[in-house]
Structure formats: C-alpha cells, structure tokens
Image: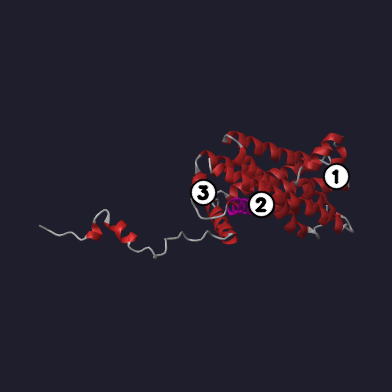
Amino acid sequence: MSVVPAEVLPGGAQAVEETAPGAPAAELGPRARLWPALLAVYRAQLSRARVARIPLLFVATFQSVGIMVMMRGVVDSRGEAESVVAGSAVVVVAFVALNLLAQYFGQLRASGGLDHYATLPVPPASVVLGAAAAYASFTVPGTLVTAVFGCVLFGLPLGNLWILLAVIPLAGAALAGLGAACGLLAPRPELATLLGQLGMSAALLLGVLPPDRMPGFIQFARDLLPSTYGVEAYARTFGARPDWAVVLADLGVCAGVGVVSLAVATWAYRRAAVR
C-alpha cells in the first residue's frame, strides 16, 4: 500500500489554505494608467494600419485636390478662394477621422473585437483616444499637401501654414469623437458606415462651399458642424493682419467640442463593451 501526502489530495490545498488564516489574499495587478495605455493603443493602431496608410492618404488628398481644381473656375473673389482652400484641407481630416473611424468602430463592434479590448486592464478612454489619435495622425501629410497645392492654385500666401498644426489635432479630435460615437452606437456596421459618409459629406459641402452663397438655414447647419470652426480658423490667417483672438476662439470651439465628443465616444464604448 502506497501512502499519498495529504497536500496532493483534492481537499489538501483547501485544508492548507484554511490552516493559514493570516496569509494575504491574492490580488490582481493594478490597472494601466491612462497615458501609458493610450500610447500603447496608439502605437498598435499605427502598426495595424501601416499597410493601408498610403492608399488612405492618396484617396483623401486626391479628393480634396480634385475639389479645388473644380472650384477654380467657379470662385471669383479672394474670400471665396480662402474658404475653398481651408475647407478642402479640413475635408482630409473629416474623411479619415470621421468617416473611416466610424467604419472601424462599427466593424469592431459587429465582429466582437470590443471583447478583446474589454479584457485588457486599460481605461476605456485610452482605447477611444488612442484609436482617434492614430486615425487623425494619418491626415497630417494629406492636409499639408492639400493646403500647399490650394495656396499655389489660388495665389494665397503660405506664411501662416503653421496654423494647421493646431487645426489638425483640434478639428481631428472633434470629428474623431463623432466618428467613434457613430460607430459604437450604430446597431449595425452598415449603419455606422452610412453615418460616417453622411458626416463626411456634410463636412465637404458645408466646409468647402463659400458661406456667402448659402441660404440662411444652411448657414445655421454649417455653424453646428465642429469642423466649420477649424475651416474658419485657417481661412482667417490668409489676411494681411489676421485677428488672432478670433482665430483662437474658433480653435477653442473645436477643442471644446472635441472634449465633449470624445467623452460621448468613451461612454458609447463602455455601453457597447458590456453588451
């Protein structure tokens, strides 16, 4: 007859645990902090979309350049030319940050990809902000190329092109938050794609067309679109003496809408992840 130690019996481990009441209970590791987790998600999104980056940039840039070429024979004043160039540059941001991000989160929700992120010890805000920042980063080269081409095409100055370094992240944050919210709240990925395309079309029509030629109710709808304030901020810098206070006010509106829209997108992510 062989003798089996009590420690290896099914109840042995339980018996040993019960005999050590003073032993500390096992604890889970701490959750990742917001900024390190955001940076990790941002890098992962950049790596995931590295192959598709060049086609995305080409499509977004070619679309905006084509719009400016078509509008070249329509506009007949400097003010209208400023609106066309500024609007076409921001359309690149809308195409990626609003349209493509809505499609990405819509497909992620439909395919169950949110379950993967839900199992990670990262704050929900880092997932939304990291993905939004990665998609907004794709727009920088295309926006700069579009702005330079438009200034040369319409004879506008290039001296204040640096303002795009503020317009791109602020307008991109506002549009990316809206795109992520549309993708996470839409019940089906097809509806998320539709909402993203409708939003991009609104940014295109209301941002590129000169506001002086729009009816009153269309101008009101234009004021409700957050990308409009990025367009206005950039268009105001073409003047000989820009009113920088008004430019900062427009950028402040973009920043405020960006905070609200990203907060809504974070809430939508939590709502979708627990279902």
Neighbor class of circle 1 (other Cα within 10 Å; few <14, some 14-19, many 20+) is: many
User: Residue at the spot x=63%, y=49% of the render?
Assistant: 57
Dot 1: element: helix
Viewer-proximal residue among 230 and 240:
230
User: Residue at the spot x=59%, y=45% of the render?
Assistant: 269
Viewer-proximal residue among 253 and 239:
253
Identify the magenta region: 125-137
Residue 118 is tagged as: 3
Question: In this rendering, is residue 183 above or below 256?
Answer: above
Residue 95 figure quarter: top right
Dot 3: element: helix
- Confirm whether residue 133 shows in the render: yes
The CA distance from mark 1 to mark 2 is: 24 Å
Place of residue 124 in the rendered image (x, y in percent of width and height, measured from the top left): 58, 51
In the picture of the structure, the residue carrying the numbered disc 2 is 139
Residue 67 figure quarter: top right
Q: Earlier in the sequence, mark 2 or mark 3?
A: 3
Q: Earlier in the sequence, mark 3 or mark 1?
A: 1
Whether the residues at callouts 1 and 2 have beta carbons within 8 Å, the answer is: no
- Confirm whether residue 72 shows in the render: no
Neighbor class of circle 3 (other Cα within 10 Å; few <14, some 14-19, many 20+) is: some
In the picture of the structure, the residue carrying the numbered disc 1 is 80
